[in-house]
Image (spheres, rainbow, N blue to C red):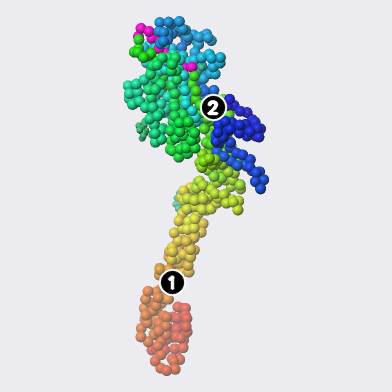
């Protein structure tokens, strides 16, 4: 049975171990205690719950309403002996009723119990019935799905599946005595399938032809034969199958479902055409549906429990959710991954890890990857995007500053500084985007000059002016490119302020003119003196 209540951990491990011997011991335990010099510790493995017959826990629904026989009570005949119509279906009588749950019951003492529909009395209107089987849980089929029909198998039907609890459906396999006529498909067998097209949906005629109601009662969805394509006919090489499950796109999903639906489209006809004079021999009757499967737990659980009438993986590896499809709260230092069968034989558990510090993998939306730096015991974001950096991608990269009017998780949070390469000391700017300027440079980006300086570019940025509108060239000199005064004859000095002395021994009366550096006001005074002396 499926429901396993709380069992002491040690017993639980032993219990699993016993089953693992029977099953071959692959992926049956999630962890084992291992001794080491540092003391005992856990070793983790990918694990999956044991397979079971899911008919024990399936919800059955049949459509349309009123398709089940017995209300009102009805007589029916059999294909084998169409003129002996002594059988009766009566919903009000426990012995003569055939309700849907008899498709999933445990039959005891050799007594066959079955669901049965009304007869085809409304021919030529087709006799249609849908049987929907629901588990409200992702399951992985591990062996053939076998549907047992009493009184003959349908001449036409479809097996469908849903992966999303009945939201959407897709065909799983078509069945007809003439696939071309019923579905426009050429008939195939699973043995026609190669590894490359194993997940193809086929139509098969193998389970629909009339061979007598007692001889062949089953309609099969072949899982074993499909596994055999990889694992060999006796499923000896399960390693090969598990490897394919990991590497072949869509293969695991092909064997996964949450619901199954049988669409019965045309009942058994006994190998002849429909005989309108005896429609009481045409109907559907199903005594059993075997669904050997296991709960899909993403290789993070070795048990599946029935809680509040819902199947639920008993998650290990610090995962949680119905399918162990996420990391438990507080164990999100790296993103969730399913366990893996690879590398064989042990596989990889891909456990969820606790963040050792208080910091989870929180990257403000600029990264979804963290790494744990062992020796400083810190979880840090890696590959921060949007020009961010830091343990939580909470800072801007060098050369960027934070736009204070945006939230930290905004994609445009970091704005480029655009510091001028010539005018700035570094590409780094302040929190307000102000670059640090070299002498003489100014502006947010350091791309202009202070008064008294001129832009030279080429790494020199701003250089102080030698002459300009404030530092005037004297004595009729002209300022060239703010760099030098071109002086008339007989004058020299940076601002042409000095008279050239022709006499030996200097020009004593010009002593004032030899004062090395002057402010412009001083200079004007000197100029008037010089001029008066000269005249
Ligand atoms: C069976 O299900 C299909 C798909 O939802 C639907 O189209 C069809 O009408 C159903 N048939 C009956 C008899 O309810
Ligand atoms: C189906 O499973 C989900 C998830 O465990 C649960 O919340 C929900 O109640 C279940 N629905 C039914 C109808 O059992
Ligand atoms: C699958 O592939 C094999 C080999 O490529 C081919 O012979 C076979 O017909 C294919 N089957 C289907 C159903 O397409
Ligand atoms: C789960 O978390 C607990 C507490 O941090 C830890 O002791 C245990 O080893 C973890 N298990 C796995 C599989 O990581
Ligand atoms: C900062 O963000 C606001 C809002 O988007 C925007 O208007 C502003 O231009 C941004 N500032 C800078 C410097 O990019
Ligand atoms: Ca039964």
Q: Quadrant of ligand 3?
A: top left
Percent coordinates x, y for residue 299 in the rendering: 53, 36
Q: Quadrant of residue 454?
A: bottom left
Q: Residue at x 43, y 12 (%)?
A: 118
Q: Identify the element where label 1 is drawn.
A: strand
Residue toward you, 531 or 403: 403
In the image: residue 122, left or right of residue 52: left
Percent coordinates x, y for residue 499 in the rendering: 41, 87
Please give the label number shown on residue 228.
none
Marks 2 and 1, the one that precedes in the sequence: 2
According to the picture, the residue beneath numbered tag 2 turns out to be 52
Q: Identify the element where label 2 is drawn.
A: strand
Residue toward you, 140 or 328: 140
Percent coordinates x, y for residue 22 in the rendering: 57, 31
Span highlighted in magenta in the image: 276-287
In the image: residue 488, left or right of residue 519: left
Q: Is mark 2 within 8 Å of ligand 6?
A: no
In contact (CB < 8 Å): disc 2 and disc 1: no
Q: Is mark 1 within 8 Å of ligand 5?
A: no
Percent coordinates x, y for residue 109 in the rendering: 56, 14
Q: Residue at x 44, y 35 (%)?
A: 230
Q: What is the total number of numbered labels drawn onto the structure image?
A: 2
According to the picture, the residue beneath numbered tag 1 turns out to be 463
């Amino acid at each position: 049975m499926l429901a396993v209540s709380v069992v002491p951990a040690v017993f639980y491990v032993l219990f699993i171990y016993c089953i693992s011997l029977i099953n071959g011991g692959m992926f049956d335990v999630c962890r084992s205690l291992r001794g080491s010099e540092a003391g005992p510790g856990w070793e983790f493995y990918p694990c999956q719950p044991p397979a079971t017959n899911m008919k024990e826990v399936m919800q059955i629904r049949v459509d349309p309403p009123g398709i089940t026989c017995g209300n009102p009570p009805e007589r029916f005949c059999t294909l084998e002996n169409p003129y002996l119509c002594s059988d009766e279906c009566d919903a009000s009588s426990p012995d003569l009723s055939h309700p849907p749950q008899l498709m999933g019951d445990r039959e005891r003492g050799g007594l066959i119990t079955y669901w049965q529909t009304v007869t085809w009395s409304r021919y030529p209107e087709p006799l249609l019935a849908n049987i929907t089987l629901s588990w409200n849980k992702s399951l992985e089929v591990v062996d053939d799905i076998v549907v047992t029909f009493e009184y003959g198998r349908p001449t036409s039907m479809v097996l469908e599946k849903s992966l999303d609890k009945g939201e959407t459906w897709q065909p799983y396999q078509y069945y007809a005595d003439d696939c071309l006529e019923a579905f426009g498909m050429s008939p195939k067998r699973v043995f026609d399938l190669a590894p490359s097209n194993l997940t193809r949906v086929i139509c098969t005629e193998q389970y629909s032809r009339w061979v007598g109601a007692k001889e062949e009662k089953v309609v099969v969805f072949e899982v074993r034969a499909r596994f055999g394509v990889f694992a060999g006919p006796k499923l000896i090489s399960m390693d090969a199958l598990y490897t394919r499950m990991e590497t072949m796109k869509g293969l695991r999903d092909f064997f996964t479902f949450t619901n199954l639906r049988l669409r019965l489209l045309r009942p058994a006809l006994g190998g002849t055409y429909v005989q309108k004079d005896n429609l009481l021999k045409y109907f559907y009757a199903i005594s059993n549906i075997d669904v050997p499967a296991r709960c899909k737990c993403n290789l993070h659980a070795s048990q599946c429990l029935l809680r509040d009438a819902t199947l639920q993986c008993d998650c290990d590896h610090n995962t949680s959710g119905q399918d162990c499809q996420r990391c438990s709260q507080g164990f999100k230092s790296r993103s969730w991954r399913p366990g893996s069968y690879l590398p064989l034989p042990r596989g990889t558990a891909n456990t969820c890890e606790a963040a050792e510090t208080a910091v989870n993998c929180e990257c403000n939306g600029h990264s979804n990857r963290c790494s744990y730096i062992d020796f400083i015991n810190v979880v840090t974001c890696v590959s921060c995007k949007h020009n961010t950096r830091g343990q939580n991608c909470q800072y801007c990269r060098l050369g960027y500053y934070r736009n204070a009017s945006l939230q930290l998780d905004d994609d445009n949070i970091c704005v480029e500084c655009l510091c001028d390469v010539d005018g700035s000391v570094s590409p780094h700017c302040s929190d307000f985007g102000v670059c640090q300027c070299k002498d003489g440079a100014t502006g947010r980006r350091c791309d202009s000059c202070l008064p008294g300086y001129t832009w030279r570019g080429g790494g020199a940025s701003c250089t102080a002016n030698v002459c300009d509108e404030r530092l005037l060239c004297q004595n009729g000199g002209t300022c060239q490119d703010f760099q030098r005064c071109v002086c008339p004859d007989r004058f020299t000095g940076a601002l042409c302020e000095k008279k050239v002395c022709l006499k030996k021994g200097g020009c004593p009366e010009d002593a004032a003119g030899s004062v090395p550096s002057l402010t412009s006001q001083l200079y004007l005074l000197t100029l008037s003196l010089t001029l008066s002396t000269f005249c």
